[in-house]
Image (cartoon, rainbow, N blue to C red):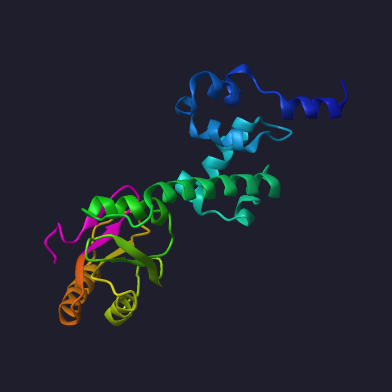
Amino acid sequence: MDNLTVMHTTLRESPPDERPREKMLERGPDALSNAELLAILLRTGSARETAVGLAGKILKECGSLRSLVNMSVEEMTRIKGIGPVKAVQIKASLELGKRVSRQQAFHDSPLIRSPKDVAALLLEDMRYLQKEHFVCLFLNTKNRVIAQETLSMGSLNASIVHPREVFLAAIKRSSASIICVHNHPSGDPTPSPEDIDLTVRLVEAGEIIGIDVLDHIVLGDQGFVSLKEKGYM
């Protein structure tokens, strides 16, 4: 058998216990590991390892799925065995997953009944952001969302927003009330002293202008904290 035949065999064939496509057909996607799911996206491995082996190496170098989501195509291609085609396949699949989650959560004029409703709208889209994003939900008199806007993007651990920017945007949309949301890139949603101070200022400004600040919610990697529920407003 010549070298070309050996290479093609290595690329196309995997041991019976490393055939994620067949496993998924037989047992469903829940039965697959992260590496096996990623291997299906890769389709083939490299000359020296199977698709599952290559997927495992990618996850090991990334450290977590969250890090993989944040990687650019250029960063992915720096991993040995990942070319532009495989990198684009991975990035496109991750982006499609984010859009599906966002579409499921954010339907037309969603009704906000509790902080959980806010988290359902925004957590999946904001949890992986590497900088703090300050987002406002603008609501009508029936607590239905009429608009959403990112008002600022901060550094790794700080978002910068002024109450006048918040309420200028709210007035433009004729909002009856607003809900403020920002993420903590660290993954820990515990409010900082700055978060609490900003919340107090926003509530005071809203009372003067006549636009209620219903809540300020901090999003983390796996959960959220409502400053209203914590008694800070």
In this view, the residue farthest toward the right is 2
Name the foreground residue: 227 vs 82: 227
Q: Position of residue 62 (x, y in %)?
A: 52, 46
Q: Determine the image quadrant of residue 41.
A: top right
Q: Position of residue 77 (x, y in %)?
A: 66, 50
Residue at image position (54%, 45%) is 61
Quarter of the image for the N terminus: give it: top right
Q: How many marks?
A: 0
Seen in the picture, residue 55 relative to 183 is either above or below; the reply is above
In this image, 2 relative to 193: left or right? right
- Does 42 appear in magenta? no
Numbered range of the magenta stretch: 215-233
Residue at image position (31%, 61%) is 145
Residue at image position (53%, 18%) is 26
Seen in the picture, residue 223 relative to 228 is either above or below; the reply is above
Q: Determine the image quadrant of residue 108.
A: bottom left
* Residue 115 showing in the rendered view: yes
In this image, 85 relative to 96: left or right? right
